[in-house]
Image (spheres, helix red, strand yellow):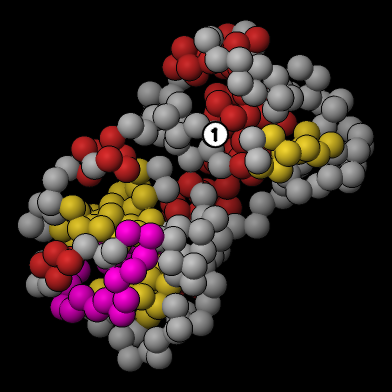
Amino acid sequence: MPELPEVETTRRGILPHVKGQKVMEVIVKRHDLRQPITQSVSEIDGKKITDIERRSKYLLLGISDGSTLLLHLGMSGSLRIVSPGDVWKKHDHFALTLENKRQLRFHDPRRFGLVLHLAESPSEHPLLKSLGPEPLEEAFTPAHLHAACVKRAAAIKLVIMDAKVVVGVGNIYASEALFRAGIRPQTPANQLTKPRLAKLVTAIREVLADSIEQGGTTLRDFLHSDGEPGYFRQRLFVYDRKGQPCRKCSTAICHEVLGQRSTYWCPKCQKV
């Protein structure tokens, strides 16, 4: 599933080709995604795309009439910039043809994505209203994380993956951030001290920022109709490395299923 860094990479990749462009045509090949594509999406025909923002894993295309196009890539979706004349792939479901003779095309084999046209403020939409702070913004502080943990005995990995606590910390990034912070994923959240939680906040920020930076170097494919999205290939320390030597201490990486998600850690580097 595309996670926060991949979605941010997508936003940065398509932004120069879409921002300020007038929509010349709205094309819907099939409506039945996770939720049906909003019928009112046709109303953005003739309007300009004023900006593209990201909230958690959602992309928000601002429209010149004050509405918003909310996109979610689901489990396997992607956005590509193509020429309008390019052959449509089997799972291309939606597109916006732009004034610059480019087309923003949404591809989603599993149809778990979303294309919703919102008249109201996106922050008031049920999908976004109860989300926690962005991990790279000032609101995500050690004090915020401590307040979320102090009464919770759940494993710390599950707490930082809770989008009501902080958005965008998916399974890979939770495992990698906990490794950087030297914290075992199973540790009860309410047993962690303020200094250790402060270290975890820093680790979360660093692993996401590093991933976004690496993603930004592989944007070539956003301009090719047959290309895969330009997602980064990160040098992971623990995730998906069961039994392999730790890159820091050579101890074998451990694995277990925690909260129905594969979880990896180094028993030597992550002692608590």
Q: Is residue 141 left or right of residue 43?
A: right
In the image, residue 217 above or below residue 189: below
Amino acid type, residue under disc 1 in the picture: Met
Q: Secondary structure at mark 1?
A: loop
In the image, residue 103 above or below residue 126: below
Which residue is drawn at the image coordinates 16% and 78% (left, top)? 24
Magenta stretch in the rendered image: 13-35
Residue 242's x, y, as percent? 84, 45
- In this view, the residue in front, 8 or 210, is 8
In the image, residue 190 above or below residue 91: above
Which residue is drawn at the image coordinates 17% and 43% (left, top)? 121
The quarter of the picture where residue 251 lies is top right
Quadrant including the N terminus: bottom right
Q: For mark 1, what is the residue?
A: 161
- Give the class, few, some or many, for how many residues have Cα within 10 Å of label 1's Cα (few <14, many ≥20): some
Quadrant including the C terminus: top right
The quarter of the picture where residue 115 lies is bottom left
In the image, residue 130 above or below residue 68: above
Judge whether residue 48 can be spotted in this image: no
Residue 156's x, y, as percent? 62, 23
Residue 89's x, y, as percent? 45, 84
Which residue is drawn at the image coordinates 42% and 48% (left, top)? 57
Judge whether residue 265 can be spotted in this image: yes
Q: Is residue 22 magenta?
A: yes
Which residue is drawn at the image coordinates 81% and 19% (left, top)? 271
- In this view, the residue in front, 138 or 167, is 167
Q: Is residue 47 magenta?
A: no
Q: Is residue 78 left or right of residue 23?
A: right
Residue 40's x, y, as percent? 14, 64
